[in-house]
Amino acid sequence: MKWVLAWLLLGTSLLAAPLTVATYNLELYANTPTFGVPPKSTEARQLVRESIRRLNADVIALQELGSLEALLELQKSLKNEGINYRYSDFVQGNDPNLHLGFLSKLPIVTRRPHTNESFLHAGKRFRVSRGFAEVEVAAGAHRLTFIAAHLKSRRQVSEGDQQSLREAEAAVLREKVDEFFKREPNGKLIVLGDLNDDISSKTLRTIIGRGRTRLFDPRPAERNGDTHPHQDPRYEPRRILWTHYFGKEESYSRVDYILLSPNLRDAVDPAGTSVLAMPDWGTASDHRPVCVRLRLSD
């Protein structure tokens, strides 16, 4: 009986522990008017919190925070409703209005904010507008590094072509990915956030990369009952993947991503990987949150 008990204990220790990660663009989550838009209403903030509650993520990357105070208010409000994110991180780049943040139930053991990155474009020097937020999180025996980004929007600006500027920011982000793999060849990396481009774009191709350090896209989709494969095996199954609504064009697109290092590919739990669909989502934000559940073996 002793060897049976030992075998059962060993089997239990090898079970994969679930870990859910998410990203959510909160659309101007500020305490003061931003771009002429008033702060979010009480209802909108409640729906933001409801979205986060439904995700039940262990670590969530946030975009379009107006200030550190806005992040702390959200963290406190969630705690008052029984969702305790004990750890947080806030990164302010060159953009004076929109910032990055993390909320985490797990300890953040290392912070590496990237707020002064720049690049040359058309003979001019530009800063990566919102910078990148990089944190290392302790998940039991595992260490996972997260790099969050909010790349240049599709809004044209006088300084340069929006597509070219976004592609240049993507190249700087890929440099951070490559630096990570040089530092930790077998490390676990998650790149996530609002990348403001489609999966076939140069922006995404640059970030995903090639070869041994090519990032993996788990393709989170709505949980709406779709299960059938595509009739053409060359293509991915037809799923509802959109994450952003653009009112001017009345268009829906996928711009929010969670990309994984190759060694996390087999840890993805499809049952816990999704784009959140809930009533009145658009009152909370023009983006829908995305989550991926991982099962990390002990």
Image (cartoon, grey):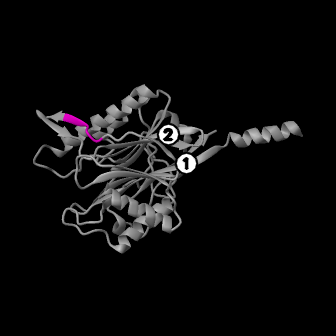
Point out residue 108 in the picture as x, y percentages from the top left corner: 48, 45
Residue 235 picture quarter: top left
Residue range in magenta is 115-119
Looking at the image, which residue is at 35% across and 34% down? 176
* Residue 117 belongs to the span the image colors magenta: yes
How many discs mark residues in the rendered view? Answer: 2
Compare residues 143 and 151 and report the one nearer the observer.
143
Residue 42: numbered disc: none
Look at the image and tell me in which quarter the C terminus lies: top right
Assign a secondary structure to mark 1: strand
| Left or right relative to 117: residue 288 | right
Q: What residue type is disc 2 on? A: Leu
Residue 12 picture quarter: top right
Assign a secondary structure to mark 2: strand
Point out residue 186 in the picture as x, y percentages from the top left corner: 50, 29
Looking at the image, which residue is at 73% across and 40% down? 11
Label whose residue precedes the other's in the sequence (1 or 2) = 1
Residue 281 picture quarter: bottom left
| Alpha carbons under labels 1 and 2: distance apart | 11 Å
Res 141 visible: yes
Q: Which residue is mark 2?
A: 144
How busy is the neighbourhood of tag 1: few (under 14 within 10 Å), some, or many (20 plus)? many
Label 1 close to label 2 by CB (< 8 Å): yes
Q: Which residue is mark 1?
A: 19
Q: Is residue 104 above or below residue 173?
A: below
Look at the image and tell me in which quarter the N terminus lies: top right
How busy is the neighbourhood of tag 2: few (under 14 within 10 Å), some, or many (20 plus)? some
Find the residue positioned furthest to the right.
1
Give the prevailing secondary structure in the magenta stretch: loop
* Residue 113 belongs to the span the image colors magenta: no
Please name which of the two marks, 1 or 2, marks the residue nearer to the observer.
2
